[in-house]
Image (cartoon, helix red, strand yellow):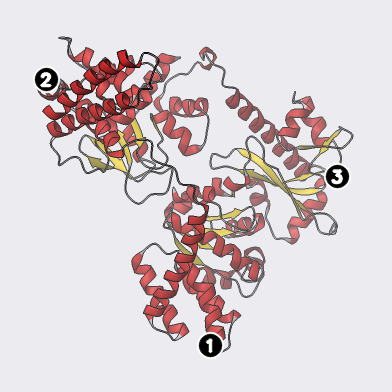
């Protein structure tokens, strides 16, 4: 199995592979990008084509090989990523030879299989049985055609307590598994029954077309029950990550460079039936960080189609908080002749087409909404408008966009732009004060420059095409113990030993020889010189001496911190001699 993994890595051009997901730019021997796994402005994500590795030197600190990248990107297990890359590279995988059983992967595969069977069961009941007639008749009133029903694999859960449970038991699934996967509910008496009963069923899929869970809509005439029942949080379904219809919308989102976001399943399905293929629906009323992170892979523009009522506007505001972090261009479409996209398309498709062709930029929408809420031409109304809009403008990170809306709001409020800026500053100070009150300060545990120099000097050496030359000229000054961390000391010790040999040095082979616990640290150090820092203009020789100086300073602190013992007099002389020796070395530098 280990050889198969190595073979897959060898056959993958890591720059081409990662470059198919994010934009990479050349940086010396390596490539750089803005990290796709956390929000940042300056690129801290570095890829090494020579060693087939990547590392983020920003907030997330993630790193690894092509397999790890795919795991992070798709949020999948090691085995799933391995299977996909094996298929991509044509490597025949023999999973039965895996040494450590991947229980997480096995459970996920089993639960996805369970959901697939449940989806087929619901769709069969809907399409082929008399039990599904009520649901079929209902969708006729919603003007959905059969091809769309099949495309989305819509189904029906019969009004039975255990029909799905009995079906899945025949497929060798246990009740406890069905419970954990959200398909069953346990009663107070300890018995199990179907979670979904008498409902129109919507399979909730991920971008890879896997069914993660379900949403069940009550049919008309059953108003006493909740309108929707959804799969709860399970090992494979997480509401914050789910975007209904994403599996069908990805390609069109990329093509249109825009995604329309709506609030319900039918509000996504009906536009799809009318040829609008870049719509997705959220579960809940506000966009989450996880959903935006997923959409950012495909587009920089989002268009919200939320209700224009108070609750809808508040959900839009909450969405701005997260969307601004990702630097999205946000627009809004409000439907004035129907309550949602589904109803609008059934009423007047042409009017709907004209409406979505003219989305309003998010901050224009918020200003107009505030003006409608406080329409009086009075000082107090202007004050209320300012109180609602200014906290939103304060979130704008782009200076051009911010300046534009400062000017626009000043015109609406009939005040100067400087006054608007002052109000924004006041709003910011209040938030910062609240944040400061929550901060718990802790003293830094190590000198950041010392750590940076340690990593940079080693990285320059490791990335050098002829490290032996640098070693002879500079690194003979250093000893492994001079480095700040024990892991750096161990890596440099092994490296120095390799340098002393006459054989040709291969950095990749050296990395493979390292103990498992040191490999990720070595990978991080290797790529560090390609990140943004202020050391590239400094003399390497000077930095090497600075490492030595830091070491002697640490030694002085150790000596001065020695605890007094019973034989203090004997120890004192020795400590004094050590102190003089170290001070002598420090002065010589």
Mark 3 burial class by Cα count in 10 Å: few <14, some 14-19, many 20+? few
Residue 573, quarter of the rendered image: top left
The one of 313 and 471 positioned closer to us in this rendering:
471
The answer to whether residue 334 is above or below residue 249 is below
Q: Nearer the viewer, residue 416 or 399?
A: 416
The image quadrant of residue 568 is top left
What x and y, as percent, mark residue 411?
42, 83
Tag 2, which secondary structure?
helix
Examine the rendered structure and indicate whether residue 165 appears above or below residue 137: above
Residue at image point 31% right, 18% down: 490
Q: CA distance from mark 1 to mark 3?
A: 59 Å
Q: Nearer the viewer, mark 1 or mark 3?
A: 1
Q: What residue is shown at x 39% (from left), y 83% (from top)? A: 416
Residue bearing the label numbered 3: 159
> What is the CA distance from the residue labelled 2 to the residue labelled 3?
80 Å
The residue that disc 2 covers is 472
Q: Is residue 302 visible?
A: yes
Which label's residue is closer to the chain start, 2 or 3?
3
Question: Sequence order check: which comes first, mark 1 or mark 2?
Answer: 1
- In percent of width and height, residue 536 lies at 18, 40
Residue assigned mark 1: 379
Residue 311, image x, y percentages: 65, 66
Query: x and y percent of residue 184 in the render?
Result: 78, 36
Closer to the observer: label 2 or label 3? 2
């Amino acid at each position: 199995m280990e050889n198969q993994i190595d073979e897959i890595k060898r056959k993958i051009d890591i720059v081409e592979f990662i470059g198919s997901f994010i934009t990479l730019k050349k940086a010396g021997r390596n490539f750089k990008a803005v990290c796709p796994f956390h929000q940042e402005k300056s690129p801290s994500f570095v890829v090494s084509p020579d060693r087939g590795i990547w590392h983020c030197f920003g907030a997330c600190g993630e790193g690894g090989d092509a397999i790890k990248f795919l795991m992070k990107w798709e949020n999948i297990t090691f085995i799933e990523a391995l299977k996909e890359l094996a298929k991509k590279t044509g490597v025949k995988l023999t999973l039965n030879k895996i040494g450590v059983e991947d229980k997480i992967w096995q459970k996920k595969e089993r639960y996805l299989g369970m959901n697939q069977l449940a989806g087929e069961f619901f769709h069969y009941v809907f399409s082929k049985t008399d039990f599904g007639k009520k649901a079929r008749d209902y969708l006729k009133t919603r003007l959905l055609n059969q091809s769309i029903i099949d495309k989305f694999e819509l189904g029906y859960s019969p009004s039975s307590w255990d029909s799905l449970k009995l079906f899945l038991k025949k497929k060798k699934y246990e009740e406890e598994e069905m419970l954990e996967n959200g398909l069953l509910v346990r009663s107070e008496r300890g018995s199990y029954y179907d979670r979904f009963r008498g409902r129109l069923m919507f399979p909730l899929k991920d971008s890879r077309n896997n069914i993660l869970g379900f949403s069940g809509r009550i049919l008309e005439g059953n108003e006493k029950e909740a309108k929707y029942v959804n799969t709860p949080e399970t090992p494979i379904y997480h509401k914050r990550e789910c975007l209904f219809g994403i599996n069908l919308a990805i390609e069109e989102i990329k093509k249109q460079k825009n995604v329309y976001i709506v609030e319900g399943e039918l509000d996504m399905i009906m536009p799809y039936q009318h040829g609008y293929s870049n719509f997705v629906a959220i579960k809940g009323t506000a966009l989450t960080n996880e959903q935006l992170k997923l959409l950012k892979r495909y587009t920089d523009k989002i268009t919200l189609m939320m209700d224009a009522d108070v609750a809808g506007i508040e959900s839009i505001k909450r969405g701005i908080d997260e969307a601004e972090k990702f630097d999205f261009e946000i627009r809004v479409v409000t439907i004035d002749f129907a309550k949602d996209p589904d109803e609008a398309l059934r009423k007047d498709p042409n009017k709907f087409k004209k409406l979505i062709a003219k989305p309003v930029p998010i901050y224009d929408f918020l200003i107009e909404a505030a003006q409608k809420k406080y329409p009086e031409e009075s000082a107090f109304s202007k004050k209320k408008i300012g109180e609602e809009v200014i906290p939103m403008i304060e979130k704008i990170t782009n200076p051009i966009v911010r300046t534009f809306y400062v000017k626009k709001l000043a015109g609406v409020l009939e005040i100067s732009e400087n006054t608007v800026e002052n109000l924004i500053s006041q709003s910011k100070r209040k938030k910062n004060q609240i944040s400061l009150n929550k901060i718990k300060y802790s003293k830094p545990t190590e000198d950041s420059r010392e750590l940076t120099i340690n990593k940079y000097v080693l990285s320059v050496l490791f990335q050098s095409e002829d490290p032996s030359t640098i070693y002879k000229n500079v690194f003979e000054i250093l000893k492994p113990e001079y480095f700040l961390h024990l892991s750096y000391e161990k890596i440099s010790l092994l490296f120095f030993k390799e340098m002393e040999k006459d054989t040709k040095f291969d950095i990749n082979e050296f990395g493979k020889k390292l103990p498992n616990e040191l490999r990720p640290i070595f990978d991080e150090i290797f790529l560090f010189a390609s990140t943004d820092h202020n050391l590239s203009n400094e003399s390497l020789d000077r930095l090497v001496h600075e490492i030595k100086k830091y070491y002697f300073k640490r030694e002085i602190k150790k000596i001065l911190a020695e605890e007094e013992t019973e034989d203090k007099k004997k120890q004192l002389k020795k400590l004094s001699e050590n102190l003089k020796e170290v001070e002598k070395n420090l002065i010589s530098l």
